[in-house]
Image (cartoon, helix red, strand yellow):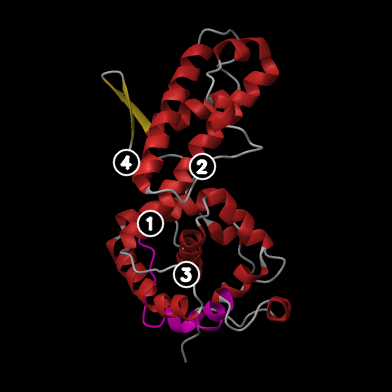
């Protein structure tokens, strides 16, 4: 008899989740149907360097779909996985599961973008989950698999560039507040305020791309100014900003261009994703 992909939901997770959420909750229904959702799908990782079990791949397929439904970039998704009982129920994880690093979500999508079989599996999974979505009044999943991946990549990348720029500005504010006041542009206080956080991840892709272009111009301007200030280029926040901008942007005849197809080749995740190391024994 073939073992099921998802083991029984841990008793602590089941008891807590069922006490808080109703039977019609999307994540509760997903957890109850997890094995049937993946029925007939042979999840195989073709990566010759790190072989990942089907159970691990299944977790990441679902997490990415959850990200899309809730417009959660990678960092926020990592927080949700650590903190939310409904997600742990849907994924059949114990309450004390420590979650995954945000970089592993990026690496999973990079793998999806180059593995056509996995994209077919995602499309099948989306079709099956559409019925669950309709029954629980969630956002529609009536999109192609590549559109889902592209949307999650886009708002994750947008948050990443916003965060990288904000951290560099904060580092400059600590080290050289006088120079920051001298070079700051008026719109920075509105665009990068953590108190107000005007980053709209639910905006239309065209609006998000325009914002990314503007953030890119701010980043290149800041890096150019920092190059003229002794002792700042070696700050970790500045090094990160420089690396992220190399991955995400290019300058063509003086014009800042956001790389629309940057996901498959970007280096935001700095190592081979191996989330198995953080999965509790099944």
Task: Give the residues drawn in magenta, as a range.
Answer: 27-46
Q: Which mark is residue 149?
A: 1
Residue farthest left in this picture: 253
Of residues 87 and 61, the one drawn nearer to the viewer in this rendering: 87
Mark 2 or mark 1: name the one nearer the start of the chain.
1
Disc 4, SS: loop
The x, y position of residue 194, in whole percent, is: 64, 36
In percent of width and height, residue 140 lies at 41, 69
Label whose residue precedes the other's in the sequence (2 or 4): 2
Q: Quadrant of residue 198?
A: top right
In contact (CB < 8 Å): disc 3 and disc 1: no
Query: Which residue is denoted by mark 3 in the rendering?
Result: 58
N-terminal of the two: label 3 or label 1? 3
The answer to which of marks 4 and 1 sits earlier in the sequence is 1
**Quarter the C terminus occupies:** bottom right
Residue 98 visible in the displayed image? no
- Please identify, in this view, whether the residue under mark 3 or under mark 1 is nearer the observer: 1
Give residue 165's position: percent from left, percent from top. 53, 29
Element marked by disc 2: helix
Look at the numbered discs 4 and 3 and tell me whether their residues touch, using CB distance below 8 Å: no
Which type of secondary structure does the marked residue at label 3 adopt?
helix
- Mark 2 vs mark 1: in front: 2
Q: Earlier in the sequence, mark 4 or mark 3?
A: 3
Given contact means CB atoms under 8 Å apart, are the residues at marks 4 and 1 in contact? no
| Residue 260, numbered label | 4
Relative horizontal placement of residue 242, taking residue 249 as reference (left or right): right
39 inside magenta stretch: yes
Residue 103 belongs to magenta span:
no
Which residue bears the numbered disc 2?
159
The secondary element bearing badge 1 is classed as: helix
Q: Quadrant of residue 258?
A: top left
Instruction: From this view, report whether residue 131 is shown above or below residue 193.
Output: below
């Amino acid at each position: 008899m073939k073992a099921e992909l998802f083991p029984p939901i841990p008793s602590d997770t089941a008891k807590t989740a069922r006490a808080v959420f109703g039977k019609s909750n999307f994540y509760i229904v997903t957890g109850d149907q997890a094995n049937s959702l993946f029925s007939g799908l042979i999840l195989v990782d073709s990566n010759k360097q790190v072989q990942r079990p089907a159970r691990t791949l299944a977790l990441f397929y679902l997490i990415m779909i959850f990200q899309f439904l809730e417009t959660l970039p990678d960092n926020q998704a990592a927080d949700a996985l650590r903190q939310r009982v409904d997600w742990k129920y849907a994924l059949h994880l114990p309450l004390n599961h420590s979650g995954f690093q945000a970089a592993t979500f990026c690496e999973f999508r990079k793998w999806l973008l180059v593995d056509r079989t996995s994209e077919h599996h995602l499309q099948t999974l989306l079709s099956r989950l559409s019925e669950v979505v309709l029954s629980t009044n969630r956002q529609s999943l009536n999109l192609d698999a590549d559109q889902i991946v592209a949307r999650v990549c886009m708002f994750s990348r947008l948050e990443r560039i916003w965060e990288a720029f904000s951290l560099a500005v904060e580092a400059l504010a600590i080290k050289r507040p006088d120079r920051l006041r001298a070079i700051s542009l008026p719109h920075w206080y509105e665009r990068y305020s953590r108190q107000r956080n005007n980053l709209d991840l639910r905006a239309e892709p065209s609006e998000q791309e325009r914002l990314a272009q503007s953030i890119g111009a701010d980043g290149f301007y800041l890096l150019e100014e920092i190059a003229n200030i002794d002792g700042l280029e070696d700050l970790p926040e500045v090094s990160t900003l420089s690396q992220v901008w190399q991955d995400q942007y290019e300058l063509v005849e003086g014009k800042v261009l956001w790389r629309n197809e940057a996901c498959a080749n970007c280096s935001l995740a700095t190592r081979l994703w191996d989330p198995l190391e953080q999965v509790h024994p099944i």
